[in-house]
Image (cartoon, helix red, strand yellow):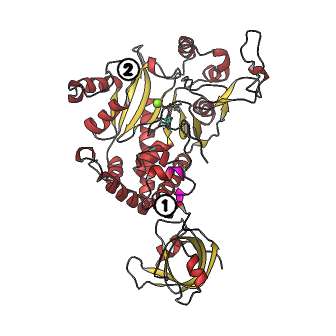
Amino acid sequence: MARTKIKDILQQEATDYKVTVKGWVRSFRNNQFIALNDGSCMNNLQVVIDLNTNEELLRAITPGASLSVEGTVVASQGKGQKVEVKAEKVELLGACDPEKYPLQLKNKPSLEYLREIAHLRFRTNTFGAVFRVRHTLAYAIHKFYNDNGFVYLHTPIVTASDAEGAGEMFRVTTLPFDNPPRMEDGKIDFKEDFFGKATNLTVSGQLEAELGAMAFGEVYTFGPTFRAENSNTTRHLAEFWMIEPEVAFNDLTDNMDLAERFIQYIIRYALEHNREDLEFLAQRLVDEEKQKPQQERSEMGLIEKLQFVLDNKFERITYTEGVEILINSPAYKKKKFQYEVKWGIDLQSEHERYLVEKHFKKPVIVTDYPKDIKAFYMRQNEDGKTVAAMDILAPGIGEIVGGSQREERLDKLMQRMEEMHIPAEEMEWYLDTRRFGTVPHAGFGLGFERIVQFVTGMGNIRDVIPFPRTPKNAEF
Ligand code: 4AD
Ligand code: MG
């Protein structure tokens, strides 16, 4: 008989029909009641087995073991579930030694411990919920852009350009490390390398997305990006996923409107499709918060927070206004900030969090940053000092989106590249868009793991990507 998913059985609440279910044992009590989970949903299916089941099989039904069960769906006698399966045939697919099964050995394993056994952590309720929500968000992202007429563009992962100009790149090479070919001046000769030039893993698909936008009007990318920044924080990964829409004819305001509508759409989608998972994660957060001192606890529950983001417009301020708010804040006057605040600085995470969590208490879009702290491609404002940039800051996370209107004027763009020592001859393909039918356009990048963190309430970015890549860590 074809396998029925546990989610379908629990959702339907119908009874008196035969099923085959397959999954992993979560618990087994009184030699009779198996809690079976197949990953299709948070809840386990209760399987009631015959009291005459043979001893050997009974001993093998331990947490982690995999079973195939044929039986009948019946109304449940017990509390906690409406229906259960009365087993007629139980087959052990794979045993699981309870003396060695890591998830069994620790009672309430910590998130840190589970990170060490990331190959097994999907089987816990928390990570089951997190990764189902991650999936839903990924799906909602594609749905949003598809329904809005965007073309999904696959931008390269290996590239010779440094889109952000930040130089935090992983080199891709097939040259021998011990004896690379060298030029007369002793420098490594990348002409001999696989691609005939120095290449790296991409930090962003934006520059190529811009090329697509100049033909399709509206495109987006959704792929892995890589940054070799040595930041061991709860918000940084060396390999993370980014969504980058790029839209011809959009200005900065259109860009902000799109980002806001997009973020609200995917959050709403998750609330509608993963309610059970989000309620579980909300409760997990409540339990976790109980360990914290009163003043550090958040005022809102997870679901409330998400609903709040749907019901309220994001605050929009300029960088200059943001700096003024910070300088006039009680925190500044009491010297609570570790980093200096003055016009021209890059906002530190403590500043961003102050604006979002203490001052506005909602997501904030900060625009028009000083040009010296932003990338070369951002559109220069009339004041000569700022660029048409926008960052979206979210409570509890900080920056989740970085974007801008792009500099579509060839002369201004080339002048900025020269000032920033970006060699134009390597970027001719990019500059061509400004030569052949240039138009105003804008786009942004949403850090996928950061939005997954925001929606699931997970405090550490390592817990929202299946196999995190961070400095000194590339296990699995
Ligand atoms: O602000 P960033 O660097 O912007 C860009 O890369 C632009 N090219 C995007 C665009 O305009 N198309 O990165 C965008 C977002 C950040 O706001 C953050 O959410 C996420 O990517 N991000 C990271 N997420 C996890 N780990 C890291 N190391 C990240 N660096 C950036
Ligand atoms: Mg940024």
Query: Measured from the top left, where is residue 183 in percent x and y?
Result: 76, 13
The secondary structure type at the circle numbered 1 is loop
**307 sits to left or right of 95:** left
Is 311 drawn above or below residue 403 in the view shown? below
Q: Is residue 121 magenta?
A: yes
Q: What stretch is highlighted in magenta?
A: 115-123
Q: Earlier in the sequence, mark 2 or mark 1?
A: 1
Of 57 and 441, the residue lying toward us: 57
Q: Nearer the viewer, residue 460 or 242?
A: 460
Would you identify the image quadrant in which residue 209 lies?
top right
x then y, percent, for residue 132: 51, 57
Indicate the secondary structure of the residue bearing disc 2: loop
**How packed is label 1: few (under 14 Cα within 10 Å), some, or many (20 or more)?**
some
Instruction: Please say whether residue 18 is visible from this viewpoint.
Output: no
Residue 271 sits in quarter:
bottom left
- Between marks 2 and 1 in the image, the one whose residue lies nearer the viewer: 1
Nearer to the camera, 179 or 414: 179
Q: Is mark 2 within 8 Å of ligand 2?
A: no
**Real-space Cα separation, disc 2 to disc 1, in angstroms:** 43 Å
| Position above or below: 346 against 101 | above
Is 434 above or below relative to 421? below
User: Quick check: is 249 in the magenta stretch?
Assistant: no
On residue 345, which mark appears? Answer: 2
Name which residue type carries label 2. Ile
- Which circle marks residue 124 in the picture? 1
Kind of residue indicated by mark 1: Thr
Q: Identify the image quadrant of residue 428.
A: top right
Residue 419 coordinates in the image, percent (x, y):
53, 11
The answer to whether the residue labelled 2 contacts the one labelled 1, judged by CB atoms less than 8 Å apart, is no
Quarter of the rendering occupied by the N terminus: bottom right
Q: Going by the image, does 454 lie left or right of 66? A: left
